[in-house]
Image (tube, rainbow, N blue to C red):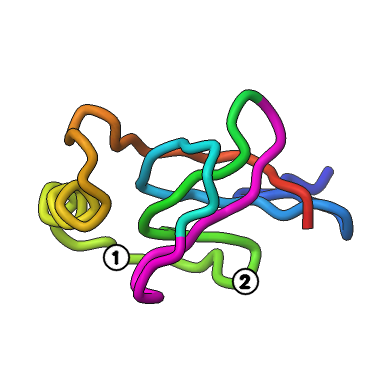
Amino acid sequence: MKIRNGFVSNSSSSSFVILGFKTNEHVNDSGKFEQLYVEGDTDYITGYLVADDEYLEYTEVGNIQEIVNEISEFFDKDVSEIKLYCGVRPS
């Protein structure tokens, strides 16, 4: 029996891990952060893309609190709104 460790997806979806916040608005930024379209209550998750189907190898994030503070300052969001999200989104 084969066991897959990591993300599983098909051609119509892709997996992700992102440190950020949910929003209903499309946010344009300097290109430092990513904005992912997701289906559900909220249309987008915006923040620091930790991993997706493009690179699923070991990723060192660094100081998470520094990244949270940077997202908070850049987008004028309260630190409590910034969370770690993972899931599958349409491609």
Name the quadrant of the C terminus.
Answer: bottom right
Assign the magenta stretch its main secondary structure. loop
Residue 34 counted in the magenta span: yes
Q: Measuring 38% from the left and 54% from the top, which residue is drawn there?
A: 47
Label number found at residue 60: 1
Q: As drawn, which residue projects farthest toward the bottom?
A: 31
Q: Measuring 56% from the left and 44% from the top, which residue is drawn there?
A: 44
The x, y position of residue 89, in whole percent, is 70, 46
> According to the image, label 2 marks what residue?
54
Q: Measuring 16% from the left and 57% from the top, which residue is drawn there?
A: 70
Mark 2 or mark 1: name the one nearer the start of the chain.
2
Magenta stretch bounds:
28-40
Q: Secondary structure at mark 2?
A: loop
Name the amino acid type tagged 2.
Answer: Glu
Name the amino acid type tagged 1.
Answer: Glu
Label number found at residue 41: none
Residue 25 counted in the magenta span: no
The x, y position of residue 6, in whole percent, is 61, 50
Left or right: residue 25 compared with residue 65: right
Q: Measuring 29% from the left and 65% from the top, which residue is drawn there?
A: 60
Q: Is residue 2 above or below residue 51?
A: above
The x, y position of residue 82, in whole percent, is 29, 37
- Quarter occupied by residue 84: top left
Name the residue nearer the viewer: 59 or 46.
46
Left or right: residue 24 compared with residue 21: right
Name the residue nearer the viewer: 84 or 6.
84
Name the quadrant of the N terminus.
Answer: top right
Q: Is residue 24 above or below residue 16?
A: above
Q: As drawn, which residue projects farthest toward the top?
A: 41
